[in-house]
Image (spheres, rainbow, N blue to C red):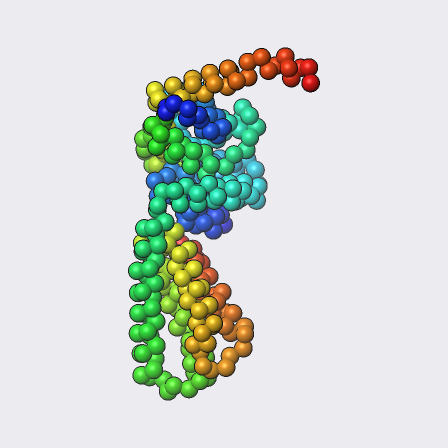
Amino acid sequence: MKRGELLGSLEHIILLALARLGGSAHGMIVRREIEGRTGRNISIGAVYATLERLEAKGYVSSFTGEPTPERGGRAKRLFRVEAAGKRALQVSEETIRSMSAGLKSRWEGI
Amino acid sequence: MKRDSPPAFACWLLKSVIPVTYREAMLGDLIEEYALRAPSSSPLTASRWFWSQACRSVPSMVWSWLRSWDWLISMSIAIGVYIAMGTLKLAADMAISKFVAPRPMTEVVLAPVVFLATTSISGCIAARIRPGVTIFLALMAMITVAVSIALKVCTIPVPWWYQFGFLTLGPLSVLLTPAVFRNE
């Protein structure tokens, strides 16, 4: 992760979903995980576009699975978080933590 | 529509806009999820879900597609097919002029037949080469007709709806014929 570069909110959520799922997961599983945990009904298109971007940045990697009849003979593309992705998540988490430190008491006062 | 098969037009729409790199994976995900949803809910609910996913995915796909420069390849293919389409139409016009006497009424009747046949064939060819090319081809056909109308290429007086038919039905036949024949 380049210095000063932060993850976008959807990038952050998708990386977290992939990390939670462990191992490898395909786009629809990631979408379901996000919907189940946050209630956000994001489109599968947004998930794939973000995963593609994350792969270009080297934060995730993907490989193609076997085609199955229930998918109309189409193969799954499985994604997994790479070490750079884990580091990016840590940096983002630390940034958010340091930026929000001490704010809770102020918000309670509002 | 079969209970376990998603809406064909939505699939065609997605095939046209999803970048090649994850077209198969994303469509497979949607088809699998549809097959899981269809038995537990009504086909209408499952279809509505599929359509909602397709429509909401289009902006992300188009943006991603523009960023990947995939459109440049599609546009190049569309230009190639467009030139072939023009040649085919010219050949058809020349062949017809040999057998049919050139009368204004005959031309008014035959021109849309030749035009729609050419655009339909070109649409099918373009879709076979690469899904997504048909959008560019339809746009090119529409621009050509619009320019022809503006320049008054047709010397025979025709009603406005005749010209409007060319402007709308030509691009529509480019887009819809491949979906009807489901050869994409």
* Frontmost residue, A82 versus B34: A82
Q: Is residue B140 above or below residue B29?
A: below
Count of marks placed on residues: 0
Return the x and y of residue B72 as percentages of the image width and height: 34, 50
* Frontmost residue, B61 versus B124: B61
Image position of B36 (left or right of A55): right
Return the x and y of residue B64 as percentages of the image width and height: 41, 41
> From where the camera sits, is residue B69 visible?
yes
Return the x and y of residue B183 as percentages of the image width and height: 37, 54
* Frontmost residue, B24 versus B58: B58
Q: Is residue B100 above or below residue B15?
A: below
Q: Is residue A83 above or below residue A64?
A: above
Return the x and y of residue A62 as percentages of the image width and height: 33, 30
> From where the camera sits, is residue B177 visible?
no
Image position of A107 (left or right of A5): right
Q: Is residue A60 above or below residue B47?
A: above
Residue B48 occupies quadrant:
top right
In the image, what residue occupies the spot 42% across and 36% down? A49
In the image, what residue occupies the spot 31% across and 56% down? B77
In the image, what residue occupies the spot 46% across and 16% down? A94
In the image, what residue occupies the spot 44% across and 25% down? A6
**The residue positioned farthest toward the right in the image shown:** A110
Residue A3 occupies quadrant:
top left
